[in-house]
Image: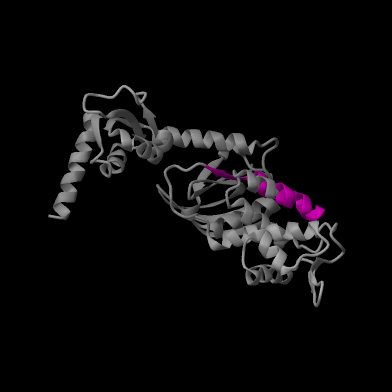
Amino acid sequence: MKRSSEIRADRLIQALLLLQGRPQITAAELAAELEVSVPTARRDLEALAMAGVPIYPTRGRGGGWRLIGGARTDLTGLTEGEVTSLLIGLAQNGQADPQHVAATRKLLRAVPAPFREGAQRIAEATVRDVAWGETADVDDPAKVALLQRAIGRRLRVRFEYAGSRGPSSAELVPLMVGSRGARWYLLGAAVSEGADVADEARLRTYRVDRIASLEILGAPGHPPAEFDAAAVWARMVERVEDLRGAVSAIVRVEPWAVRALCDRFGPQARLLDDGESLEENGRVRVEVSAHRADALAEQLAGWASVAEVVEPVEIREELRLLGERIAATYR
């Protein structure tokens, strides 16, 4: 589910594009276009004006809201910060969706030329990807926005990081941000010695929710020559998926629960039966994977009423121990 701030960011961008395409628009007309109430549409128009968008209201019969300079303006009244904020709100909110891709392209064409390059960097360096079983709302949007601003301006960042090996600090060039479900990741690298260019050989992945004390530095930070963000993201996803699939188990699942279980495990679930060839007990065999045996057992514990682990013995033993701990807690 979208946050209210994300929904409003979408509306403000739509309102901006509608204003650009018409000589003027009334709050009632905007409300009809955006399918909101007239007071909400009026507040959106006022918010755009307060943010510095060059629009003004005309009162009386035949009045409405107009862009200064006419409908063909290039929106030169927008500041770099306003352009960045609008683009970030859109980029964080489902960039893979065709409507959002189209809106991003329209916004990039509409923004003032001096700011277009930075906005384009943000769009290209932000990835929204399918979930790894995550269902929670987007985490740390403020940190993601700060990283996107640094990418747009090609500046380095410094932060404290709570990694699996303990806390550490980092100063690096942020190259891209991407999400898998609700969790966001940063891909970045320290600069090469004596240069302002990121060293791709030192590229690392960071979970944004583990980043603290994040700040944008004044020092420039450029991506490596011919840096392919999409290819780097794909390699990262493949590497993480391999780690998540280090341990596997064969599970007998009730036919009606197969789809739900496969949706929960995502790429880490694979049907071993075609759905037609059921076992004697009427169940379907599914292979599921995780990064550790105990983690896989914990994920499967909630499916005990509809899924039975056949092999390996290690996972069955982990489930037995888990069951004993639960029974001891609630005895």
**Residue depicted at x 66% and y 37%:** 227
The relative height of residue 244 versus residue 152 in the rendered view (above or below) is: above
Front in this rendered view, residue 40 or 6: 40
Residue 201 drawn at (x, y percent): 58, 36
Front in this rendered view, residue 13 or 220: 13
**Residue 130 lies within the magenta run:** no
Figure quadrant of residue 73: bottom right
Main secondary structure found in the magenta portion: helix
**Residue 116 lies within the magenta run:** yes
The relative height of residue 10 versus residue 289 in the rendered view (above or below) is: below
Single out the residue that lies furthest toward the top.
277
Front in this rendered view, residue 101 or 43: 43
Residue 15 drawn at (x, y percent): 71, 61
Residue 265 drawn at (x, y percent): 38, 38
The relative height of residue 262 versus residue 75 in the rendered view (above or below) is: above
Q: Quadrant of the C terminus?
A: bottom left
- Span highlighted in magenta in the image: 105-129
**Residue depicted at x 37% and y 32%:** 246
